[in-house]
Image (cartoon, rainbow, N blue to C red):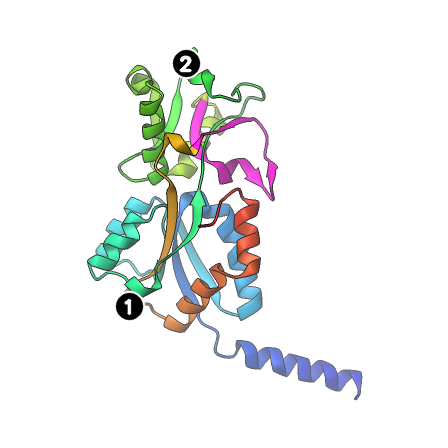
Amino acid sequence: MQPARLTLLAALGLFTLHADAGEVRVAVAANFTAPMKQIAALFQADTGHTVQASYGATGKFYAQIKNGAPYDVLLAADDTTPARMATEGLADPASRFTYAVGKLALWSKKPGYVDARGDVLKGPFDKLAIANPKLAPYGVAAQETLQKLGLWSSVQSRIVMGENITQTLQFADTGAADLAFVAMSQTVKDGKPVGGSVWVVPQALYTPIRQDAIVLAQPQDKAAAVAFMNYLKSAKAVTVIRNFGYDLP
């Protein structure tokens, strides 16, 4: 068979594969921003479906979805919000699963500043950034950690709160805070530290951060939404998720 004909057949096959491609609109917890961008690119290349992703605090997404915001899938930073949405008829209960288990980390832009046990929290510092516990599950984990360490009362006056975990990291990255409780995924890329200094908080100090995905009750393109949910469980997606420091259930 002639090379030109082979090329044409390959192109026709690719066209057939992607001819029914659609779009999935995904509301993504801020801590999962970096891995989501990689997974979305892989998903689009492999399926032809496009991804329209929005990033922010899980609590805010819940309020937006309840008010009719046009999303098809929620990737939450917890498991309680998707469960609540399923109970309230806002999402499909059968579609829910845990796509990642998050880890909390204490991070500073300054190399050597954060020690291996987090004792820096007991010493003199100006500001500590955490995500707002009313909006972000990682903020809840940060508060639980400080309470279990017996430090919540002593540091409250020095806490600055981010609307989500991305803004919380920015506080420490720009010098507005000396320290920040962030997602471990924000401190690594492809399994390697991004710089600064970090303490990975022992998981005994906070409630496990099980991050659930769920399809909303009336997705714009159900086939694309289901395809994306299935892709989150694929070997390619799992590799990305693990490379950013998440565990899997």
Up-down: is 174 above or below 226? above
Magenta residues span: 179-202
Q: Residue at x 27, y 61 (%)?
A: 91
Q: Residue furthest bottom?
A: 1
Quarter in which the N terminus is drawn:
bottom right
Q: Residue furthest right?
A: 2
Q: CB atoms at circles 2 and 1 under 8 Å apart?
A: no
Q: How many marks?
A: 2
- 97 magenta-colored: no
Q: Position of residue 18 (x, y in %)?
A: 54, 76
Which amino acid, mark 2? Lys
Q: Which mark is residue 218?
A: 1
Disc 1 is placed on an element classified as loop
Q: Residue furthest top?
A: 124
Q: Nearer the viewer, residue 140 or 97?
A: 97
Q: Position of residue 7 (x, y in %)?
A: 72, 80
Left or right placement of residue 89 versus residue 143 in this view: left
Q: Position of residue 156 (x, y in %)?
A: 30, 20
- The residue where tag 2 is placed is 122
